[in-house]
Image (spheres, grey):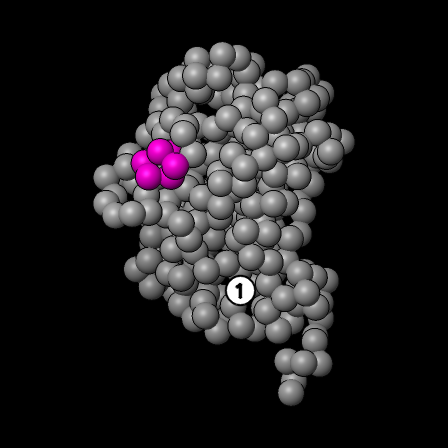
Amino acid sequence: MILKEKKGIIFGALDDKSIAWKVAEQCAKEGAELVLTNAPVAFRMRGDTNIKVLAENLNCQAIPADATRLDDLEQLIDQSMEIFGGPIDFVLHSIGMSINIRKNKPYTDLNHDFMQKSFDISAISFHKLMQSLWKKDAMQKWGSILALTYIGAQRTFPHYGEMSEAKALLESYARTFGYYFGDRNQVRVNTISQSPTMTTAGTGIDGFQEFLDFSDGMSPLGNASAEACAEYCVTMFSDYTRYVTMQNLFHDGGFSNMGMNPEILK
């Protein structure tokens, strides 16, 4: 078990379709001790797949926290270190939401108040999280901080809206804070650019199924699944990747390097 005796916080496990849910399950399988967290509204969801059910299944704590609020993040970190009995080995930021996309607002007619909220939830929350971890010196030496992103940060996908800019900002925070964390604590900070994945958030994007099929056809290896992404995250949390930092790592079956796949033309 490559995460034996390691302790980590997983942000964003909403339901069993979410990547963070799969990551939490895989981390537990590899021996990690976990704290799960999501916005307070996620804790009010009912049914057989919600964060409280996952926490019970994995025998771990689930703590509500609004990732856009510094006081919530600071309290979460304090509680987690108390549960763990010491510093944190790894953190996953798997948070993203666009009100404009939910309301089907086209990119040329965005509500800018909604846009600012999208940036705060999807990207600035990552800086707030890392700043809180930094100020509390909460990360274990040689620890790992990860955030999930998408190639829309580098390329134009019209239906992805302002999430393209949000992900570009997220990736920039990883590079810059990666310097500071590496220099002081040997902590690495990276982003994983995942294939389009059938999550609750992803399915809210117009034309998502068609794009999922296109991406799968373009990628020599096909789309990477949520389960495969979870395995990659575990690798990035492990000691086997201690010298990988400030990187945006594509986990997309080769899509990011393709120009055209002849199979698409058939």
User: Who's the residue at 40% across and 29% down the image?
Assistant: 59
Check residue 56 for magenta coloring.
Answer: yes
The answer to which of 27 and 151 lies nearer the viewer is 27
Quarter assignment of residue 38: top left
Above or below — where is 28 with respect to 218?
above
Check residue 250 for magenta coloring.
Answer: no
Furthest residue toward right: 243
Q: Residue 21: x and y, percent?
A: 45, 44
Q: Residue 132: x and y, percent?
A: 48, 21
Predominant SS of the magenta segment: helix
Q: Quadrant of the C terminus?
A: bottom right
Location of mark 1 (residue): 157
Q: Tag 1's secondary structure?
A: loop
Above or below — where is 55 with respect to 70?
below
User: Who's the residue at 61% across and 30% down the image?
Assistant: 3
Quarter assignment of residue 32: top right
User: Who's the residue at 50% across and 26% down the image?
Assistant: 33
The reply to whether residue 6 is in sight is: yes
Q: Which residues are magenta?
A: 52-57
The reply to whether residue 39 is in sight is: no
Q: Residue 223: x and y, percent?
A: 59, 63
User: Who's the residue at 54% across and 24% down the image?
Assistant: 7
Q: Residue 157: x and y, percent?
A: 53, 64
Q: Quadrant of the N terminus?
A: top right
Quarter assignment of residue 177: top right
192 horizontally vs 211: left or right: right
* Amino acid type shown at disc 1: Phe
The answer to which of 21 and 184 lies nearer the viewer is 21
